[in-house]
Amino acid sequence: MTHLVLAQETAASPLPSLLFLGLMVAVFWLFIIRPQRQRAKAQQELSKTLSPGEEVRTIGGIHGIVVSVDEESVVLRVEEGKIRVSRKAVGTRVGPDKPEAESS
């Protein structure tokens, strides 16, 4: 007695795989790319609107008061003197005149 088993191949639909791939791309964009773009836009806006007298904190953790601003850098007054840092190195405004929109 021999039993013959016939393998029946069925063509699987690619739709579930494509839907899963599309869902993964959407999740990646929603949780990684979009927030990063928002942070970059906020950083650029902060860099553009710096003015003397504002208290700021650099991305390295240095606190200081803006003394002067030019195209590429900012001079900060710190406890024992002044330092020059890149405009991109200023992380946040701190102090009482900090805008409400930046508190998040």
Image: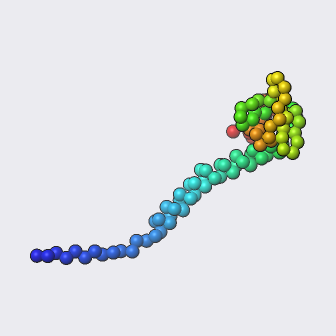
| Residue 65 in view, yes or no | no
Farthest-out residue, top: 80
Q: Where is residue 94 shown, x and y percent of the image? A: 76, 32
Q: Where is residue 50 shown, x and y percent of the image? A: 84, 40
Is residue 33 placed above or below 55 in the rendered structure?
A: below
Q: Where is residue 10 shown, x and y percent of the image? A: 36, 74
User: Which quarter shows the C terminus?
Assistant: top right
Residue drawn at point x = 75 percent, y = 33 percent: 57
User: Which quarter shows the N terminus?
Assistant: bottom left
Q: Nearer the viewer, residue 82 or 101?
A: 82
Residue drawn at point x = 49 percent, y = 61 percent: 20
| Residue 36 in view, yes or no | yes
Q: Would you identify the image quadrant in which residue 43 lies?
A: top right
Is residue 21 placed above or below 92 in the rendered structure?
A: below
Q: How is the image coloured?
A: rainbow
Q: Where is residue 99 shown, x and y percent of the image? A: 78, 37
Residue drawn at point x = 77 percent, y = 47 percent: 44
Q: Is residue 27 left or right of residue 53?
A: left
